[in-house]
Image: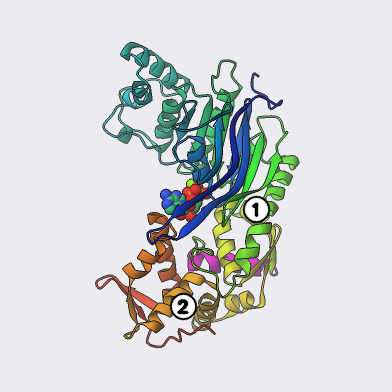
């Protein structure tokens, strides 16, 4: 095996990186704070963090697609001032050109680098072969399954023979089995003698994926994104998810991820803003279901165990746990969750009473729900345009995130019978019976 961790040469360096974005009305959103990272030849590094912790932003900095607000990005010792010539990217969404065949999609990057047609053709065929797409050269993306499309995504990156392969959640849009297959193939490719890539940096929110693939897991915290820990994974490949050492490491990293983040999530200040404490991406039904499970487990549970019993990834449960903690229904104590009194009342109450409890907790503890309630109280007619809230959200979130936050606030508020959204008028209207004042 050519690739080993043994202190290879430094390929990339992020030195004292701060990154902030400026919103529409000039306020700053601090996304990365004092990030220092080195990527070396011979290693696979996973950047692990929750949604919004700045993982994609870090990858775009490394790729030279973004310049930092302050600090320096270096490739082979030289400050990076344009697109990184040694890097190729694989995206979650595949990002293929639908009107081009597999062959032409794979050749695209070579054409951009001014390589002659005959060589393009030959190199693309080789990459297509290497990644198991042989025979699909003239197919179009829409004729392919998700897994095959992502193979095209890989071929398109590998054909460039990059020093550095950057992958942004490349497996998260695939079903479990396909994802597992592709991960295994990636590890096998990495182990081949003539694999030209010297370093792989993969972004993921999935702890098990990080431990399965990486030599080093860089754990990111949120608000602002920063490195909170680094864990070296020394287990030989292929790694067995059931092995005690594997499970122990997943537990350890899980503790690192929850330990710090939940401090801010579990006890938001009255003054916390919807930007500082976003609503976790969880439905009311999902939150209630999780609480019932914990209740059924006599009020205390080990999350990795619950995840395993449900045949879910731990990471799929995290937004539910975050939401329940934000609402004060659960306490998180490194890896274990404990039902609070309020959480227990909520689970036992009848539907009307549980709505009242949810309303009280959300109004008090979920900043965006509080903001919507305040806007409704402040408006003369107990109604506000949803676009008004959306516009505010877009000042601190990307468009997609802002929309999702609004959807969540509406779902939570609707369940709590605090307010409702009318599609025809595009307005959020207070429920006539609701008390919108925080308790
Ligand atoms: P992750 O990949 O970990 O989910 P991102 O790097 O995509 O996180 O985003 C981190 C934060 O930066 C998020 O709050 C996101 O809304 C914000 N953000 C990312 N790109 C931009 C941008 N171009 N303008 C404004 N905010 C952005
Ligand atoms: Mg991302």
Quick check: 274 left or right of 340?
left
Query: Under tag 1, what secondary structure?
Result: helix
Closest to the camera, between mark 1 and mark 2, is 1
Q: Is residue 290 magenta?
A: yes
Q: Which residue is mark 1?
A: 257
Residue at horizontal 37 percent and vertical 37 percent from the top: 95
Question: Is 434 in front, or is 184?
Answer: 434
Image position, residue 391 (x, y; %): 35, 64
C-alpha span from label 1 to label 2: 30 Å
Locate the C terminus by quadrant: bottom right
Image position, residue 6 (x, y; %): 71, 25
Quick check: 11 left or right of 119?
right
Check the image and tell me how it is coloured: rainbow
Does ligand 1 reach within 8 Å of label 1's beta carbon? Answer: no
Image position, residue 362 (x, y; %): 52, 75
Question: Is 68 in front, or is 151?
Answer: 68
Residues shaded magenta? 283-298
Query: Under tag 2, what secondary structure?
Result: loop
Image position, residue 5 (x, y; %): 69, 27
Point out which mark residue 416 bears: 2
- Residue that protrudes farthest toward the left in the picture: 424
Q: Is residue 338 above or below residue 231?
A: below
């Amino acid at each position: 095996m050519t690739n080993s961790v043994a202190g290879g040469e430094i390929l990339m360096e992020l030195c004292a990186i701060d990154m902030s974005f400026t919103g529409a009305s000039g306020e700053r959103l601090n996304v990365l704070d004092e990030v220092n990272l080195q990527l070396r030849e011979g290693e696979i590094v996973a950047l692990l963090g929750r949604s919004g912790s700045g993982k994609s932003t870090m990858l775009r900095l490394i790729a030279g697609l973004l310049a930092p607000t302050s600090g320096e990005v270096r490739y082979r010792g030289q400050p990076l001032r344009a697109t990184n010539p040694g890097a190729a990217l694989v995206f979650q969404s595949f990002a293929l050109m639908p009107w081009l065949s597999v062959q032409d999609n794979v050749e695209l990057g070579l054409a951009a680098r001014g390589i002659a047609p005959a060589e393009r053709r030959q190199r693309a065929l080789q990459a297509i072969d290497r990644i198991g797409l042989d025979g699909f050269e003239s197919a179009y993306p829409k004729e392919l399954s998700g897994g095959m499309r992502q193979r095209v995504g890989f071929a398109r990156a590998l054909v460039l023979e990059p020093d550095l392969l950057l992958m942004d959640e490349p497996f998260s849009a695939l079903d479990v089995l396909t994802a597992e297959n592709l991960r295994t193939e990636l590890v096998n490719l990495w182990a081949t003698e003539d694999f030209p890539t010297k370093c792989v940096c993969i972004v993921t929110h999935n702890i098990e994926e990080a431990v399965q693939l990486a030599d080093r897991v860089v754990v990111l915290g949120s608000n602002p994104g920063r490195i909170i820990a680094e864990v070296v994974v020394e287990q030989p490949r292929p790694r067995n998810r059931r092995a005690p050492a594997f499970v122990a490491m997943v537990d350890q990293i899980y503790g690192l991820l929850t330990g710090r983040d939940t401090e801010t999530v579990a006890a938001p200040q009255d003054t916390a803003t919807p930007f500082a404490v976003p609503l976790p991406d969880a439905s009311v039904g999902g939150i209630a279901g999780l609480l019932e499970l914990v209740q059924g487990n006599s009020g205390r549970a080990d999350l990795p165990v619950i995840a395993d019993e449900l045949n879910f990834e731990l990471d799929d449960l995290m937004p539910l746990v975050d939401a329940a903690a934000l609402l004060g229904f659960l306490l998180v104590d490194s890896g274990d969750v404990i039902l609070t009194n309020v959480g227990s009342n909520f689970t036992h109450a009848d539907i009307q009473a549980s709505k009242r409890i949810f309303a009280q907790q959300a109004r008090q503890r979920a900043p965006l729900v509080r903001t919507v309630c305040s806007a409704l109280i402040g408006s003369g007619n107990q109604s506000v345009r949803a676009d008004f809230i959306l516009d505010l959200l877009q000042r601190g979130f990307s468009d997609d995130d802002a929309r999702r936050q609004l959807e969540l606030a509406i779902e939570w508020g609707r369940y709590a019978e605090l307010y409702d959204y009318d599609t025809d008028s595009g307005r959020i209207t207070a429920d006539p019976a609701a008390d919108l004042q925080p308790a």
